[in-house]
Image (cartoon, rainbow, N blue to C red):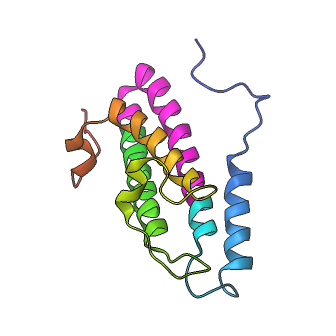
Amino acid sequence: MSRTASPTAQDFVPFATAALDFHRALNVPGGPLVTTRPELDALHAHLVSLHGLLDAHAVRTGRLVPIEGDQLSAARIRIWQAADHVHAAYHAAPHPGSGEVPDRDACQVGLPEGAPELTICQRHQRTAHLVRRRTTPADLHAPFTGLVRH
């Protein structure tokens, strides 16, 4: 079994990084003073996608190089924590039209705000299910998530 990716495999991660840098440079300086709900939704989607990528790497790498896998698992936990905070920020952001701020617990009931706003909650709950299978509550709340092996 090869421990490295195929040399012909295209690495799209640098393109995603460049796109984020480009977006920040163009939109944040001249944009609104507060982050909009669509922006938070897009950031959440990005973090959830990154969580999935790190999860795949942690699982595969952990079988071959446990120390590296532990570090990737720690990174995966931190990315989930970031996604959870962005999800909370989304629910703390006022609605564009009314300025109303919904209750964060509303997403637990299924259809908190109606389409398309509920997609962030659905995405968050799908990922939370995976997080619950791969981590313990202690892992999620520990000040240090990296297991050190010698």
The answer to which image quadrant residue 66 occupies is top left
> Is residue 19 positioned above or below 101 on the image?
above
Residue 115, position as x, y percentages in the image: 62, 55
The answer to which image quadrant residue 101 occupies is bottom left
> Is residue 46 positioned above or below 103 on the image?
above
Residue 32, position as x, y percentages in the image: 64, 86
Magenta region: which residues? 43-70
Main SS, magenta region, reads helix
Q: Depth check: 66 or 26 in front?
A: 26
Residue 127, position as x, y percentages in the image: 46, 40
Q: Depth check: 81 or 63 in front?
A: 81
Q: Quadrant of the C terminus?
A: top left
Q: Depth check: 68 or 102 in front?
A: 102
* Residue sitting at x 49%, y 24%: 60
Residue 58 lies in the magenta stretch: yes
* Residue sitting at x 70%, y 53%: 16
> Is residue 53 positioned above or below 37 on the image?
above
Residue 118 lies in the magenta stretch: no
Residue 31, position as x, y percentages in the image: 68, 84
Q: What is the tally of numbered marks visible in this picture? A: 0
* Residue sitting at x 43%, y 69%: 102
Specify whether 145 is left or right of 127: left
* Residue sitting at x 57%, y 56%: 114
Specify whether 150 is left or right of 131: left
> Is residue 7 positioned above or below 77 on the image?
above
Q: Depth check: 76 or 115 in front?
A: 115
Q: Quadrant of the N terminus?
A: top right
